[in-house]
Image (tube, rainbow, N blue to C red):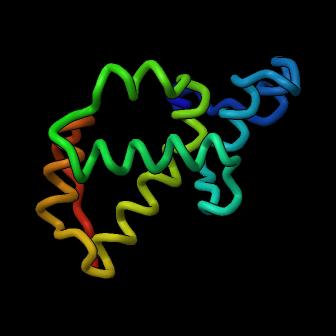
Amino acid sequence: MACVARFGLTSQDIAAFSANSFVAEIMSNSAQAPRHEELTETQQGHLSEWIKALFETEGISDELMSSCPPQDFYRILGTLFRVSLHACRVGAISQDKLHGALERKFGTKSIYLNH
């Protein structure tokens, strides 16, 4: 995704990858955040576990990391952020909790939310 942005790659450039490849899928769908109901049952399970790890536990376990393949993580990442931001907007979690979770778990330093 960084290469797409940095080098201005187009869909024609992405076509150099097999249409069925994970790289082509992620590069062509990187701006999408599927709705929860659009995820497969397995992806919904991974999403639930990541939400728990971010907001209900003290950290991301090795078990979670090993049970969620990188391909699935990248597929649910946009949804994870969308759901997290929505929870903050409706008051289910505080802005401080959202910032803390993202800083602690992902090393994100500068996230600003406009309500």
Left or right, residue 31 beside residue 65: right
Closest to the observer, 76 or 61? 61
Left or right, residue 4 beside residue 57: right
Q: Measuring 51% from the left and 50% from the top, which residue is drawn there?
A: 78
Image quadrant occupied by the C terminus: bottom left
Left or right, residue 15 beside residue 55: right
Closest to the observer, 2 or 60? 60
Q: Measuring 61% from the left and 43% from the top, which residue is drawn there?
A: 43
Q: Does 10 sit above or below residue 21?
A: below
Q: Position of residue 36 (x, y in %)?
A: 60, 60
Number of marks in the rendered image: 0
Image quadrant occupied by the N terminus: top right
Closest to the observer, 80 or 26? 80
Q: Measuring 60% from the left and 27% from the top, which residue is drawn there?
A: 71
Q: Position of residue 58 (x, y in %)?
A: 15, 39
Q: Position of residue 90 (x, y in %)?
A: 32, 81
Q: Position of residue 44 (x, y in %)?
A: 58, 49
Q: Measuring 23% from the left and 51% from the top, which residue is drawn there?
A: 56
Left or right, residue 94 beside residue 35: left
Closest to the observer, 113 or 54? 54
Q: Does 44 sit above or below residue 69?
A: below
Quadrant in the picture for residue 60? top left
